[in-house]
Amino acid sequence: MDRTAFGRLLREARQRSLLTLESLAEASGVSVRAISDMERGQSLPRQATLSELMDALDLDEDERRKFVEASVRRTRPVPQQLPPDLAAFRGRKETLTAVHRLTSRVAERGGHVVISAIGGMAGVGKTTLALHWAHQVADRFPDGQLYVNLRGFEDSGQPLDPAEALGRFLHALGVPSNAIPGGTEERGALFREQTASRRLIVVLDNAHTAAQVRPLLPASAGCLTIVTSRSQLSGLAVTEGADLVTLDVWTPEEALAALAARIGEERCRAEPEAAAELVELCGFLPLAVAIVGAQLSASPNVSLGLGVRELRATRSRLDALSTGERQVDVRAVFSWSYRALTPQTARFFRHLAVHPGSAVSAEAAASLGGVEMAVARPHLRELASANLLSRDAEGLYVVHDLVRAYGAELVEQETDDRFGAETRLVEYLRHNAHVAHQLLVQTTSEPVDPPAAGVVRVTFGTHEEALNWFRQEESTVSAALRSLDDPRLLRFRMNVTQYWVAYYSVMGRWAEEIETKRIGLDAASQLDDPVAIASNSASLARALAETGQADEADRLVELLQVQLPRLGPAQRAGAERSIGWVRGRQKRHDEALHHAQRALEIYRTEGDDGAAARELNAVGWYLALLGRYQEAIARCEEAIPLLRRNGNLRIEAAAWDTMGYARQHLGDLTTAMANYRQSLDLYEEVLDGYNQAEVLGHLAMAQLDMGDRAGARASWMRAADLLSAIHDPRAARMRANAQALDVPAAHPESL
């Protein structure tokens, strides 16, 4: 409990006893000021003071227990994640009355979770209502508030993964990062355990489906969960007993009150008919009224009548903003807001509307506008002030989909260079992905082409920064690859796909890699670019082989082999390397070794020591798989000094794993386990969880051979957690291996 909770108990007990502050002070010997501070939540009593107060109040045993529990000083964190309440909130009286009854149900009955799914059209104020409600009742939930934007309705089509949301919640609740499991199920179980004894508000904003929400529901007494969504989420009502609240547009009275709260009641009283017509022209939509109010507030000398005449004069319409009961022109609202911008910010807004998704980073926005970051940030602030965009909890700028639609129309009307903005966006994604890609794969052998003029260059100092950038722009690249279909962008889109493969590979995101490389291969084929066809075929074949799609992988290898005569030495070596990798995954180890040796020969002929060192490990691995263990060790021992010289930690980690595998099969288990641990340290340093899991599987088998069942179980469980975090289906197998060790007669399956 906290000071507020204790103060409430003390005040209620004093009032039941018909005591004033003074009379309680006289009866207990505690000063009036001290009692007042406690009741106002300013302090908690010491043990002796607590006893004196309880005696003076003549509390029974149950009441004394509650007082003692409430007086315990808090040691665990109290998250305060709610975004600010809207100062100008007006209306929704009936809805607020209804939802407050839901809140009371938690307080009065206990043992039940109330889930309220707030539905309604875009711009109707779902989030605003949810946050206002949460702020109003926050003092009744002393253990804090959790908030997350689930991004259920964005053009990127990538709602927030429940596992990621759970990770944020667990971190806010004080769970150390290294104690947060990888899988959604495990994180959900830990979340329910952490919230079991807490009274929390959990706001799940912008949910996509009931399935996305369910893992995030605390199953504890005294927690209030508020869900907002454009969908009704009736599945939550069926399976979770949720109370569904659907919002419509404001009533005329509510819309007028909201407008008056923003521009002042005096202006509305001075021109009542104009004020009424303004909100009617806004369709009584909260978003539209907010924009009108912001602009009128910024222009105190503009009459409401002039605003009405300007809105009437605009005859184009955004159909999605119509209430359906009268012909109202809400596009004019956006037009009015837009014309109030400075010319430079207006141009920036038009280019920002070219972005294919609803959430955009400041860097991507600056690239769209072709301006430096120092110029972009004031534009973004001006647009936020005009309610043409907002910011989410992660710092991304959110453009309402209808506002973005209006801005996209302006691009055509103003004859802006849409192609130039789209080019800068894909160049931003390509160039910075290339730089981040090199950091992830530990290579600088490939020069980074400079981006187009006006594109922001991001500086990466660590692997974590590179991964964070990929995560930040993942929804943008997905939307861009699907929607930017200008034929002149074909090569740009193809180049973008090339450098996102490293991120998907490190994360073990094979489905995303396959989708992306299909786009890249299609573009390369249209361009008849042999190097690009080979590169995309190789990456796609690798991903298909990894996911067990052998037949299609074979077709890609055939396409790749057709391109070999058209390639230069470096590209030919890369193609041979990729074919070897695919054959290795298909357990065609003789063929894999053949292609790896051909790649190694070309790299050596070309004098590319870094690539040769990398391929030495590949040759060593295939030798080990063929049972030629001493040869495998020799190749890796030759490779490691070269890899260190080139700073290639990922492949050095692979080489240590290869040597561990070979030595394990030679019976040298002690050295093998030391090699595996060296490999794990390096993979952890480069944040490669997918390959860490691979090595942990090898280590577990070595530990089992040593008779260390507990160690083997721990290794398999850690591997399962790492794979669960990236949704790799092999996680179940790793976990089954670990659990099999709980049964003496069972024998875990080897990787």
Image: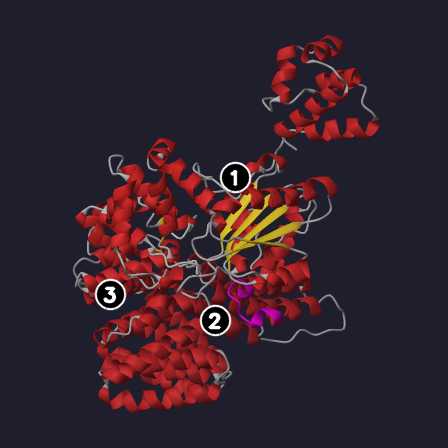
Label 1 sits on a secondary structure element that is loop
**Comes first in the chain, label 2 or label 1:** 1
Q: Which residue is mark 1?
A: 80
Distance CA(mark 1)–CA(mark 3): 39 Å
The stretch in magenta equals: 723-732
Classified by dominant secondary structure, the portion drawn in magenta counts as: helix
Label 2 sits on a secondary structure element that is helix
Q: Quadrant of residue 214?
A: bottom right
Can you see residue 656? Answer: yes
Residue type at numbered disc 2: Met
Label 1 Cα neighbours within 10 Å, binned few <14 / some 14-19 / many ≥20: some
Distance CA(mark 3)–CA(mark 2): 48 Å
Residue type at numbered disc 1: Gln
Q: Which residue is mark 2?
A: 659
**Comes first in the chain, label 3 or label 2:** 3
Query: In front here: 111 or 76?
Result: 111
189 relative to 298 in the view: left or right: right
Q: Quadrant of residue 529?
A: bottom left
